[in-house]
Image (cartoon, coloured by chain):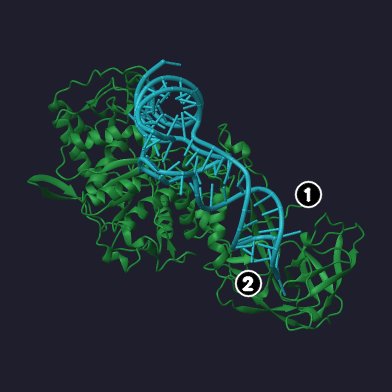
Chain colours: A green, B cyan
RNA sequence: UGCCUGAUGGUGUAAUGGUAGCACAGGUGACUUUGACUCACCCAGUCAUGGUUCGAAUCCAUGUCGGGCAGCCA
């Protein structure tokens, strides 16, 4: 059990999760195999982080915090063609937001501009890049403009990586290959057919060294040559068939500019980046399982002097009714199915944050889902439940009417104001209240009145009674319609004896309804989001764009109780009987309120339509 | 017709040779100035077939089904 001091999570204590990776870590700790457990979260800055990454972040940072370890944030930025600084910034923001108050004390960053230092380990030359001591940035909370620490990045290891590649050549374990990309593919064979050795495989070490140096010296165009590992072209593991280590790309890098025209590939860069940072447990998703042999081969071939990291794989998160793929999310953004990466309908961390999902809810959800090697699809209901669990105890209750219908209380004078005490949150141990004004004209929800009520309808109907929450019981005397038959007004009488303090407060009626005073309310744009896809597995047929829900967003002008004019983005609200809402941090402005519906309340009543 | 990997209620998971449990979803009822919350009860599972064992979800064999692997992406 761990006590969370700065977290705003609904539950101060959470049971420590257990899964097969944590079991491995626990055993390594028990056997004292490492001085400190060090994990890493290694996003590529080619898109925004999504809820699947949240699972990885919580796993890696979770393991770090449970073992008094560290988790490095490292950008895996070895492909300049797809990466951008804007993504680096967005990812950094999202990670900081997700771990704030929970694992930020375990966040591993490096001193600005630093690259691995040449050291000597057991008499052998070595490189290592230390994380900034937690104390240095802990008090500082590692904000985006923190000048004392920055995330790690593979691109800051390009010098060392080049040296390691040279070392591999000298050991006869890598060669420069002149095969074109298509010939390379042809030589590689297929999973059930062995590959063939490249005709350039037997080049001398001296020639390889010379050619590799000239690759770096910009002598060759893109794709003309590559550096390849010399392993086994007949291996049943495709990744062991002389995989590429370096390719030529005359493309500027967002971090290193024009300094390099050769860039290492994932398999070569990742394991060594892990090594340079002193990572102990390198946790990734299932599709990298086949790469583990190459990960281990690379580290072993270099005969590195320090303990090498180990890779473990887990199944990535799949969520019903959503797509969790950076590539596909990018299409939705580029093709304008949504307004941007941070559209509240998207499962991106930015989108979820904007929608009003607390970081604690995301953490609660992903830890609840568990970590296994089984490919599964998690029901969105599990996510929704986690969100409500966090919001219910923390959200301020407010009255708001989304689709108003005017109601006149005929026995209240036009200038009369009746103050009512409304509870801010009934879940609090000692609930507080605020005043809301009741006047002659109020708005109630259109759905809360039915001229021809369906069976078991508890709400207002002609001649029926209902309680205006926190106020009194009213009776519907008359339904006023315009020439087209549209209901324009409900004329009711208020039973003032049922107000708080009145003789009949305890009188029961079946229904209670939310409302706002027409003369004491403020307008707001409210965005009602629904799931982005109409089917639970949108990409099952590879046509996810055809399943986009055309009604995923409905915008209404709502009537809010007056106190909401001072709403804050830091606060979560429950509009009573409707759901949880958050002020939109992007589109709200002074005098213009925009709320996003985070999630509806559970609704057990399903009227037949 | 290769290699790797996996399979526990509708869904997600736990049980590491010894009573198959938890959560979500669904259902019924209680409570309710939120048809929310809360509470009670119900529903429902070890992929199959053999084997080892006093005892198998767990170990072994075979099969079935699913996922991954042939980017100079990560």
Q: Which of the 4 image quadrants contains residue A440?
A: bottom right
Query: How dense is the environment of label 2, judged by Cα within 10 Å: few (below 14), some, or many (20 and up)?
Result: some
Q: In front: mark 1 or mark 2?
A: 1
How far across and down, in percent of the image, does residue A439 sit?
78, 78
Q: Are marks 1 and 2 in contact (CB under 8 Å)?
A: no
Residue at 74 percent across and 61 percent down: it is: A403
Residue at 24 percent across and 17 percent down: it is: A199
Near-viewer residue (A88 or A277): A277
Is A286 placed above or below A177 here? below
Q: Which residue is mark 1?
A: A608
Left or right of A477, for residue A341: left
Near-viewer residue (A353 or A206): A353
Is A290 placed above or below A414 here? above
Q: Is residue A573 visible?
A: yes
Q: Which mark is residue A583?
A: none
How far across and down, in percent of the image, does residue A322 sit?
55, 44
Left or right of A368, for residue A221: left
Q: Which residue is mark 2?
A: A564
Is A38 placed above or below A10 here? above
Near-viewer residue (B74 or B37): B37
Q: On what subunit does the disc labeled 2 rest?
A: A
How far across and down, in percent of the image, does residue A390 sit?
53, 61
If the image is split into quadrants, where does the N terminus of chain A sit? bottom left
């Amino acid at each position: 059990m761990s006590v969370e001091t700065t977290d705003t999570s609904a539950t101060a204590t959470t049971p420590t999760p257990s899964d097969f990776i944590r079991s491995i870590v626990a055993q390594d700790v028990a056997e004292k195999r490492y001085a400190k457990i060090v994990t890493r979260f290694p996003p590529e800055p080619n898109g925004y982080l999504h809820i699947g990454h949240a699972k990885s972040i919580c796993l890696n940072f979770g393991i770090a915090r449970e073992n008094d370890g560290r988790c490095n944030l490292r950008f895996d930025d070895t492909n300049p063609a797809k990466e951008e600084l804007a993504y680096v910034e967005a990812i950094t923001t999202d990670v900081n937001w997700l771990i704030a108050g929970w694992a930020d004390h375990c966040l591993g960053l490096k001193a600005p501009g630093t690259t691995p230092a040449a050291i000597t380990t057991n008499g052998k030359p070595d490189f290592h890049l230390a994380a900034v001591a937690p104390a240095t940035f802990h008090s500082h909370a590692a904000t985006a403009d923190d000048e004392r620490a920055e995330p790690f990045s593979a691109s800051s290891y390009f010098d060392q990586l080049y040296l390691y590649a040279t070392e591999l050549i000298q050991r006869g374990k890598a060669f420069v290959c002149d095969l074109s990309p298509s010939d390379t593919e042809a030589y590689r064979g297929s999973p059930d057919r062995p590959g063939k050795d490249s005709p350039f495989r037997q080049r001398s070490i001296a020639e390889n060294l010379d050619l590799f140096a000239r690759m770096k010296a910009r002598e060759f165009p893109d794709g003309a040559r590559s550096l390849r590992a010399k392993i086994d072209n007949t291996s049943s593991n495709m990744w062991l068939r002389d995989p590429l280590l370096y390719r030529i790309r005359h493309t500027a890098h967002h971090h290193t500019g024009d300094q390099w025209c050769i860039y290492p590939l994932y398999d070569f860069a990742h394991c060594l980046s892990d090594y340079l940072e002193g990572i102990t447990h390198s946790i990734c998703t299932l599709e990298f399982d086949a790469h583990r042999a190459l990960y281990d081969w690379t580290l072993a071939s270099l005969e590195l002097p320090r303990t090498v990291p180990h890779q473990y794989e887990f199944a990535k998160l799949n969520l019903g009714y959503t797509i969790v793929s950076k590539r596909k999310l990018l299409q939705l953004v580029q093709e304008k199915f949504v307004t941007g990466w941070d559209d509240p309908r998207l499962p991106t961390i930015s989108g979820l944050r904007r929608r009003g999902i607390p970081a604690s809810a995301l953490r609660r959800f992903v830890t609840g889902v568990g970590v296994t090697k089984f490919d599964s699809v998690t029901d969105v209901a599990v996510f929704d439940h986690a969100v409500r669990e966090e919001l219910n105890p923390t959200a301020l209750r407010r009255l708001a009417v989304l689709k108003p219908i005017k109601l006149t209380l005929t026995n209240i004078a036009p200038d009369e104001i009746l103050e009512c005490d409304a509870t801010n949150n009934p879940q609090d141990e000692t609930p507080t209240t605020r005043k809301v004004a009741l006047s002659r004209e109020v708005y109630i929800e259109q759905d809360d009145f039915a001229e021809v009520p369906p069976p078991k309808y508890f709400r207002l109907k002609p001649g029926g009674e209902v309680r205006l929450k926190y106020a009194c019981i009213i009776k519907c005397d008359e339904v006023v319609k315009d020439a087209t038959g549209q209901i324009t007004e409900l004329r009711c009488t208020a039973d003032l004896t049922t107000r708080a303090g009145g003789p009949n407060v305890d009188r029961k009626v079946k229904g209670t309804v939310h409302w706002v005073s027409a003369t004491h309310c403020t307008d707001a744009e409210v965005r009602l989001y629904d799931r982005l896809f109409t089917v639970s597995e949108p990409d099952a047929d590879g046509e996810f764009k055809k399943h986009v829900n055309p009604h995923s967003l409905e915008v209404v002008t709502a009537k809010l109780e007056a106190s909401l004019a001072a709403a804050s983005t830091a606060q979560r609200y429950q509009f009573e009987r409707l759901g949880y809402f958050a002020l939109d941090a992007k589109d709200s402005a002074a005098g213009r309120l925009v709320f996003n519906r985070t999630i509806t309340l559970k609704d057990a009543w399903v009227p037949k339509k």
